[in-house]
Image (cartoon, rainbow, N blue to C red):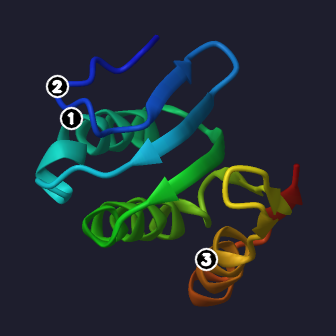
Amino acid sequence: MEIRKDYNELPDIHIDECKMIITISGKSIPEEGYNAWFPFIRKLREHLKEWDKITINFQFSYYNTASTAAITTIMKMLSENQVRMNIVINWYYKVYDSKKNKFDSDMMEAGEEYRELYNFDNFNIISV
């Protein structure tokens, strides 16, 4: 299932309900910030009530400050459910950004910060 994007500035969001895997990929630059993410957050809340496990793949190429509130909300929701369900978070980052022609550690550092803040058992930071 794909989440319909009402805003062009949102990343692609794919939900595999059979495998209980959510993949969020691409750029997130909505000016509306949290409001733009609300349909997905509502859907995630439903799945967290129904599922006994979940894997979330974060594959951001970039996200702006306005998206940070939504990502933080997602992390809090997952954290609140990690006692009753198996949660796996895969945070992907590019080691080398060919568009910028430099090594880019911003996404790696963001993943490390989320892992530290929420203390997930299965939070994987993966270079691509």
Q: Residue at x 77, y 61 (%)?
A: 101
Mark 1 and mark 2 in contact (Cβ < 8 Å)? yes
Front one among 100 and 4: 100
Q: CA distance from mark 3 to mark 1?
A: 24 Å
Label 2 to label 3: alpha-carbon separation: 26 Å
Q: Amino acid at mark 3?
A: Ala
Q: Earlier in the sequence, mark 2 or mark 3?
A: 2
From mark 2 to mark 1, how far is it between C-alphas?
9 Å
Evaluate whether residue 38 shows in this view: yes
Q: Position of residue 61 (x, y in %)?
A: 59, 50
Q: Residue furthest front?
A: 101
Q: Label 3 belongs to which residue?
A: 110
Mark linked to residue 39: 1
**74 or 87, which is in the foreground?**
74
**In this image, 24 relative to 10: left or right?**
right
How dense is the environment of label 2, judged by Cα within 10 Å: few (below 14), some, or many (20 and up)?
few
**What amino acid type is highlighted by mark number 1?**
Pro
